[in-house]
Image (spheres, coloured by chain):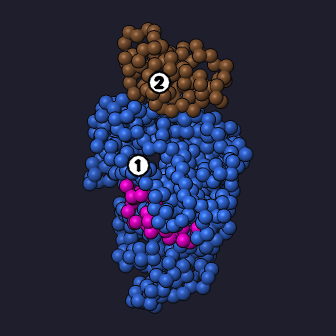
Chain colours: A brown, B blue
Amino acid sequence: MTQAASRDEIVAFVSSRILEHVAGDVVAIDPDTDLVELGVKSIDAVLISGDVEDRFGIEVDPVLLFECRTVNRVADSVAESLARR
Amino acid sequence: MSVYYIGFSVTGHDPAFAIVDGEGRLLFAEATERYVQDKRAWGIPPDHFDHLAGALRRHCADATRLVAAATWAKPRPASDAPGDGGAERSFGIVDRIQAHWMREQQRRAFEFYGLNLPLIAPGVPIERRAYDHHLCHAAYAAASSPYEDAQCLIVDGEGEVGSVSLFAMCGRRLERRWRSFGPGSLGFFYGFVTQACGFDWRLGEEWKTMGLAAFGTPQPDAVALLERLVGLERGRPRAAPIETWDEVAAALAPWRREPGEDVLRGADLSASGQAAYAALADGILEAAELVPEGNLVLGGGCALNSSYNGAIRRRFGLGGVHIPSAPADDGNAAGAALLAWQEDRGGPPLPRGWDNPYLGTAPDLKALERIVARGGFRRVTEIADGDTGTIAERLAGGAILGVMRGRAEFGPRALGNRSILADPRSPEMKDRLNRDVKGREPYRPFAPVVLEDQAEHWFECADPSPYMSFTRRWRAEKRAQVPAVVHADGTGRLQTVNAEAAPWLASLTAELGAVTGVPIVLNTSLNVMGKPIAHSVEDAVTILATTGLDALLIENVLIEKAAA
């Protein structure tokens, strides 16, 4: 994955990973909803941070999701890291 | 201007420090446990004042600048922070109180590392830095390897984000390929097995589990239970939920051994744990982007699993496998110092000349003089320099000899400088050593020293093993000649020696062969059960005086219990 990853791609990737981890009937992720409200647990947040690192080839802190709180802010942070690279 | 880089291991257990000079040479490295004589030295700061002061006096007298480098970029989060659950869930063996305690040990070590330096070196500017835990492991492991290019795999209990990191070394430069996130580690898995076998992970008794495995048979049901604890996703370990650990712990009851029970009761569980460990380790290696006939550098505490390591090269079709003498958390003190040096030089390739394991403190000759003059020993002989024939004769006569010569080994294995040596031909030697000298369980095995160019004659695999990192199978027809160093499963955790890297031990091995016809020396560490390897001359003499050791060679002075 290179800088070409669009913001939409990042949102889609993070949302899909969250859907895999969150139990229940959630079928779509509102990118502005707080992740805790979505039911993302701390362990899920760490694992998804790792998935983001693998997918986009940037160094990601394990607390990325919890610091950013929403999918949109995660995408902003990742896009910023990709642009800096 | 002389700058020195002091690496400090700040995990909270296995503290150590290492000194690298401005040319990138590793001048000194030693675990704190040796100096304080407290196994694993839990909670003891790595910059123990007197230990550090002595080494700086000897190696950094002209320092005009010091850089203190820590082996973690930051401490693990406190128990209530995001990302919590790492230690608790990974372990399955520590409760909340223990997890909190472990993190406090680390937090303190991290907060205070290097703060003794201004007192030790007044007026010298000091800078503190911190580096990624697995990168420290990798830097040291890769620098100590002979390779230009290799995959460098770090597997341990946990780092800042997870327990596995893969690096590629190209032209002796490291680049991270991937790392695992979150709980789930082979280190904690093995700790769980160790507890279930009635041993104590906190004391580092994983050795006992590994040694005991040779007496048992993997039980399919037990292996299946253990496999539920840690899964793998593209080589990344993933811990099962904590409830699963509890269920598995309960279901292992038929094989479990409680502390104090007959040791062999834990044999099948150890063997099952070792088998499950091997399957997990295989899964990680399969994701390590290995190249046929390429090289592998292995680091992190799991690289001490010599039973597993023994066959990696052949099984994975590799050109070479290198494991440093101190792959666990003591070793990455050297890595942190090296990374600080590299940072100041703009990231040059990893230096060479890092393959010498004899990096610790040398015996204090004044203490030796005093002990010889006042100790009241019945027989003290000065051996001519290089006269290994005299020593070989003593060994051949059945003597058990402690050795303290030159600088101490860096890492957990005694490689001839802080060793107990014996002739392995006698079937009673193993029992004598375990019972009368080491004070440990009768099943515990001993390692053989073999001349590198004769390894093929004795073992089914002739690959070098200079730091006892690999367990290999003895040739079946040779086993009866050296019963004291053949493990229950026909293997031996061999040390291969040559005249260049270990001249004294190589010469002694050849001399013993000349006397007995069997050029193999039994080599075990100069300590008693539960204690670290002897550090001072006084430590060594205490072992002589309080155990069945027959003699002690300190430098060239042979102290014997028996009268002439």
Which quarter of the picture shows residue B415? bottom right
The residue that appears at 30% across and 34% down in the rendered structure is B246
Query: Which residue corresponds to mark 2?
Result: A68
Query: Which residue corresponds to mark 1?
Result: B106
Bin the neighbour count of mark 2 within 10 Å (Cα to Cα): few under 14, some 14-19, many 20 and up: some
| B385 sits to left or right of B293 | left
* Protein chain holding label 2: A
| B315 sits to left or right of B401 | right
The residue that appears at 37% across and 40% down in the rendered structure is B78
Q: Position of residue B374 (x, y in %)?
A: 41, 89
Residue extending furthest front?
Answer: B123
Cα distance, mark 2 to mark 1? 27 Å
- Residue segment shown in magenta: B34-60
Secondary structure of the residue carrying tag 2 is helix
In the foreground, B101 or B244 = B101
Q: Are marks 2 and 1 in contact (CB under 8 Å)?
A: no
